[in-house]
Amino acid sequence: MENQVDWHGRAPNREQGEQALKELQERGEATWR
Amino acid sequence: MPSAVKFPAPGRYRELERKACAIRQHVIRMLTAAGSGHPGGSFSAVEILTALYFRVLRVDPRQPDDPERDRFVLSKGHAAPALYATLAERGFFPLSWLEDLRRLGSPLQGHPDMRKVPGVEMSTGSLGQGLSVGVGMALAARLRGSGYRVYVLLGDGECQEGQVWEAAMAAAHYRLRNLVAVVDRNGLQIDGPTEKVLALEPLADKWRAFGWSVITVNGHDFSELLPALESVGYAQRPTAIIARTVTG
Amino acid sequence: MAVSSGPLLATREGYGRALVELGRRDERVVVLDADLSKSTQTAGFAREFPSTFAIFATQRALNQIFQSVAYPGLNAKIAASHAGITVGEDGASHQAVDDLALMRAMPGMTVVVPADAYEASQATFAAAAWEGCSVYLRLGRPAAPVVTPPEKPFTIGRITVLREGDDVTICACGLMVGVALAAAEKLAAEGIQAAVLNVSTLKPLDTETLLAYAARSRAVVTVEEHSIIGGRGGAVSEALAAAMPVSVLRMGIRDTFGQSGKPAELLAQYGLTAQDVAQTVKKAVERKGKKNG
């Protein structure tokens, strides 16, 4: 989603939402290590 | 330019970074459930909001009406999901409210409604008005002899609104050293990059010309955000923090 | 109640004096003026009374009033002077003829139009004390005749009856109250008894009093220094349409812009003199006769 104009005003659908959550969790785990 | 902004490697601010991560997750869940909303502008503001509510702002969720509390105005009201998630994490209302974002009857309206949500200082949504509200709050502090500080988060596209500059002029005129404007400089708006729609650069120069102290930081880096947010009131002038961020 | 032959006073003066008094009583009162404090009479001063010309206070700041005052339920008293065409020579760009329509349609906004300087003073105190709701206070530029007793406390939401009469009910506000009273005197000489109602609060409208007089006279004329769309005429028509089939003739600016001119000339130009009111009243009475006949 980074730096994409399209994501200014559009909500993610179920799939995109789950994808994003996965990416976040991965990044989060990197933080917590 | 914003595309050069990097998320810093995890470091001293582990707790804050975890909080920011949790808030981002809430925002995704909220927006997916709601089926509408503004992800880009919500995400770019997350570290700013985390820094404010978990470090900088003197607020107490058990006393949301304390007259001496610091004030925060989300002038870019469409980033409401990020504010809601932050306020819930901070304890102003139950996390369970978040799943009802934008639903009929929910206190979590599409744009912040101060009458419905504890912790929200002002209803916003029509861009360009939040800084004027901040000026009023900062002036009121002085009239009352109160020591509270006022923080206003603006979008960079929002700085294309003339009213922002009238407020900026007033803030400098009244020497409001208790006022901080944070500009979420993510470089994008609905119609495209800000510099293609209505160019803002040189943005820092503009704020300086209007009589503000200006600090530019990486808006995702707590080691830069925190000192900037805390540097309020050392000069006889309001402070503008230009936070370079990435949407999404 | 007749039009007093005493000195002429502008409503904005009554407001200005009340502000000074309010400031004395309560140090929390704050007045904000956009460079017009000498004109709006707030200069005599320093609770949030933003003041400027009516057209700028409403049209120009409309979204600000909505987003930052009315919608968040904040308690601001917006006192706007120089309303209507009697602003005079400055012309259309400075004459508010739709401010009442705009403020009436704003949820959570109380709309008050004092008829003279004394009422303006009293209304200022009443507005300051009006909790829980913002108030729009409409004031005028010209010095005007006094039609209410000084020191009479102002009750927001109440119509005052200034003259009794069963043949027709004239609903007026602001400067037009004096005009309506003058018209009523002319009409009395011709055997037509007109009641004159000072509808000084437009919202919330005192429908009880309005309906009582409308039921009795079965003919209503409204007159205002404002468009015939959406202001006093609009409010009265809406209330009556819901309750009883009485015809309402609306006098005001007929969906046009203002223009430069001397205030008195403009009132004549736009059909807002006592003579015009008397004529319209006769039409209303005639219409009533035709229906019953």
Image (spheres, grey):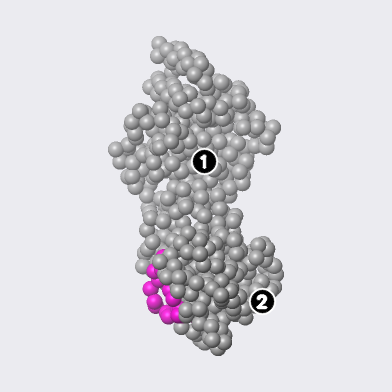
Above or below, B60 relative to B138: above
Q: Inspect the image, locate mark 2, and give the three-letter code of the amino acid beneath it.
A: Ala
Identify the element where label 1 is drawn. loop
Seen from the viewer's position, the closer of residues C126 and B3 is C126
Graded by Cα atoms within 10 Å as few (under 14), some (14 to 19) or many (20 or more), the crowding at tag 1 reads many
Above or below, B95 relative to C188: above
Question: Is C218 displayed left or right of B3 in the figure?
Answer: left
Q: Inspect the image, locate mark 1, and give the three-letter code of the amino acid beneath it.
A: Gly
Q: Position of residue C36 (x, y in %)?
A: 57, 64
Give, as a single range, the part of the protein colored magenta: C144-164
Q: Residue at the location (52% across, 17% down)?
A: A16
Q: Is residue C7 magenta?
A: no
Q: Quadrant of residue C110?
A: bottom left
Q: State the residue position of label 2.
A: C268
Seen from the viewer's position, the closer of residues A13 and A6 is A13
Query: Going by the picture, which residue comes out furthest to the bottom?
Result: C189
Location of the N terminus of chain B (image quadrant): top right
Q: State the residue position of label 1.
A: B125
